[in-house]
Image: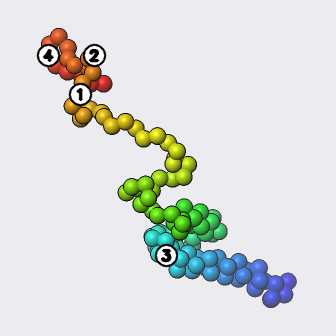
């Protein structure tokens, strides 16, 4: 085997891996992601770390055609946009159901 072949087999994949890690290190802060975590992940887990980063980055990419606070304080995922809201109520709403109003000894019970 000649020297050029050995160089291509051993150094080219390493160079591609280091370039991908550098891309993650530069790109992560643009999306509000932890630079150190993603750089170490991309460095220690070759190629899978890069693809995991790209997948997570895609989840954080905002839609420029839509306001992030359109539905209130929190953005609702498009798969949940047609869900109906839960009725207000619960243990602190001041109402008690007849069966939970109390027992014979005057104490109330909650399940």
Q: Which mark is residue 30?
A: 3
Which residue corresponds to the image point at 47% horizontal and 69% vertical from the top-left? 33
Which residue is identified by label 1? Answer: 95
Q: Which disc is residue 106 wearing?
A: 4
Image coordinates of residue 75 in percent, x first then y, are 45, 56
Q: Quadrant of the C terminus?
A: top left
Residue at image location 37% in from the left, 36% down from the top: 87
Q: Residue furthest right?
A: 1
Q: Residues under labels 2 and 4: Cα distance?
A: 13 Å
Residue 63, located in which quarter of the rendered image? Answer: bottom right
Mark 4 surroundings within 10 Å by alpha-carbon count, few (fewer than 14), some (14 through 19), many (20 or more)? few
Closer to us: 105 or 92: 92
Q: CA distance from mark 2 to mark 3?
A: 56 Å
> What residue appears at the point 75 percent right and 85 percent down from the top-left corner?
7
- Residue 49 in view: no
Observer-nearest residue: 74 or 49? 74
Q: Which corner quadrant of the image does residue 93 belong to? A: top left
Circle nearer the viewer, 1 or 3: 1
Closer to the observer: label 1 or label 4?
1
- Under tag 3, what secondary structure? helix
């Amino acid at each position: 085997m000649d020297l050029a072949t050995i160089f291509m087999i051993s150094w080219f994949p390493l160079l591609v891996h280091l370039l991908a890690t550098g891309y993650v290190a530069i790109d992560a802060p643009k999306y509000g992601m932890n630079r150190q975590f993603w750089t170490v992940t991309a460095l220690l887990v070759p190629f899978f770390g890069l693809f995991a980063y790209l997948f997570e980055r895609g989840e954080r990419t905002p839609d420029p055609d839509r306001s992030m606070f359109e539905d209130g304080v929190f953005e609702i995922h498009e798969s949940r946009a047609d869900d109906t809201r839960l009725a207000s109520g619960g243990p602190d709403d001041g109402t008690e159901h007849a069966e939970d109003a109390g027992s014979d000894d005057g104490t109330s019970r909650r399940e």
